[in-house]
Amino acid sequence: MKPVSDRKEALLARLADLNDRLVSIEIELDSHNSADWEELATEREDDEVLESMGISGQQEIRMIEAALGRIDNGDYGFCAKCGAQIAEERLDVLPFTPFCKSCAK
């Protein structure tokens, strides 16, 4: 079983990566000001993709922050719904999940 401290370290590293990515996305979104209509249309399409990535990143940040809160409270690794221990394999794939496999369905 992987120590909770290792999981916390990995969650913090992922959180830092996501925050850096969101800053980069924001900078990129602010940089588009083309006067050419065709270029502007392409930039707007790109902006939609970037905005979607930003929203996805924000959601993952919220889930990671919640997982870090559960670590601090001593509840990490236990299902928020039924209280059962979450399988190690599930936490390896989704380290921020609050639910066991059964309750996640």
Image: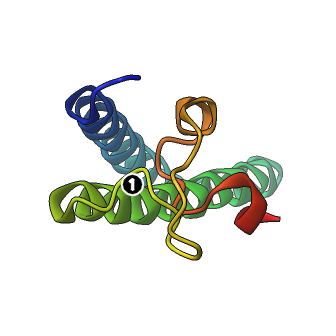
Badge 1 amino acid: Ile
Across and down, in percent, residue 51 comes to 61, 61
Quadrant where the C terminus is found in the figure: bottom right
> To which quarter of the image does residue 1 belong?
top left
The residue that mark 1 highlights is 64
The answer to which of 93 and 61 lies nearer the viewer is: 93
Q: Residues within 10 Å of mark 1 (few under 14, many from 20)?
A: many
Q: What residue is rendered at 24% in x and 64% in y?
A: 69
Say left or right for 25 vs 103: left
Query: Is residue 10 among the parts visible in the rendering?
Result: yes
Across and down, in percent, residue 45 comes to 78, 54
Say left or right for 74 vs 103: left
Look at the picture and state if 39 lies above or below 78: above
The answer to which of 97 and 77 lies nearer the viewer is: 77
Across and down, in percent, residue 25 comes to 46, 48
Say left or right for 104 vs 1: right
Q: What residue is rendered at 54% in x and 55% in y?
A: 97
Q: What residue is rendered at 71% in x and 48% in y?
A: 46
Query: Is residue 30 among the parts visible in the rendering?
Result: no
